[in-house]
Amino acid sequence: MTTRHFLTLLDLTPDELNKLIRRAIELKQIRNNGEIYEPLSNQVMAMIFEKSSTRTRVSFEAGMAHLGGHALFLSSRDTQLGRGEPIEDSARVISSMCDVVMIRTFEHETVTTFAQHSRVPVINALTDDYHPCQLLADMQTFLEHRGDIKGKTVSWIGDGNNMCNSYINAARQFDFKLQVACPEGFDPNPELLAANSERVSIFRTPEEAVQGSHLVVTDVWASMGQEDEQKEREREFRGYQVTPQLMDLAESDAIFMHCLPAHRGEEVSAEMMDDPRSVVFDEAENRLHAQKALLEFLLVKPKA
């Protein structure tokens, strides 16, 4: 049987993604009920971190423990990858000893190359191009708070970064309309835009982009690796802060999300983080449940 990977949302079908999201809600209830469910007993996940994280490490490590498995943390300092071993060689070795590999890194090519030479599933836990695991949590959170996102309108405010690229893929897979507000020069991947032109629109002001929106999303202006651009980006993104006043221009039942960590006073106001329309902490917790559903999907064989 072909090994399944999760490098972008396009690696699963829309039907598989929707079933996975609903399964995440079930697994959340199982945990909240105090039930023990350990289908991954004796299975090991290698977690390769070239970019640091709070939510990614905690959610995957806790998720494997809840499912009865074990998570092995590997930073670039802990492996030969950090000393220049070819990705292909590391993939062959690590995948011969572990049951699944999670990678959080810079270049997307790193995860695609690793997956090509891995005998076990590989999960993209963030690259400079995509962040599909976060979108699973976001879609779960919207479903819990507002129901099916199909046919709805989502507004992305800020940099056309990896999160924005993944929202474009989500618009395709979950069938919603995406309105992106970003300054010129900070647009998302042009090939993705061209391939999804019927459902993705670019605006130059947040006020335009939030019209008719049911979900407003933002992210930091300078991602990891862009710290030297911080001051320039603060100038370019002035006026792109999500505030309660901006949310008032969206639909009356619109909710706000942010993948965190948030820079209060930059891309989002402190007031917006604490606004009743903000669901960012539910969203953060759902990283745990959505990724448990993903691990179950990739590692537990369906019953005949």
Image (cartoon, grey):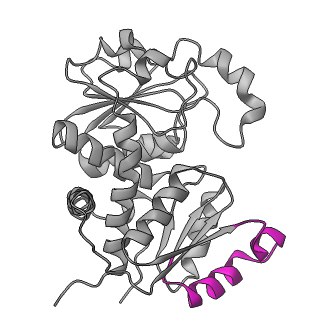
**Can you tell which quarter of the image residue 237 is in?**
top right
Where 200 falls versus 84 (above or below)? Answer: above
Residue 58 in picture, x, y percent from top left: 51, 57
Q: Which residues are magenta?
A: 75-100
Task: Specify the quadrant that holds the C terminus.
Answer: bottom left
Residue 94 in picture, x, y percent from top left: 62, 83
In the drawing, does residue 131 fall left or right of residue 53?
Answer: left
Whether the magenta-drawn stretch holds residue 228 is answered as no
The residue shown at (64%, 18%) is 236
Task: Specify the quadrant that holds the N terminus.
Answer: bottom left
Q: Nearer the viewer, residue 59 or 205?
A: 59
- One can see residue 269 in this view: no
Residue 199 in picture, x, y percent from top left: 30, 37
Whether the magenta-drawn stretch holds residue 79 is answered as yes
Where 297 falls versus 204 (above or below)? Answer: below
- One can see residue 115 in this view: yes
Q: Nearer the viewer, residue 242 or 192?
A: 242
In the drawing, does residue 90 fall left or right of residue 24?
Answer: right
**Can you tell which quarter of the image residue 19 is in?**
bottom left
The residue shown at (39%, 78%) is 68
Residue 78 in picture, x, y percent from top left: 75, 71
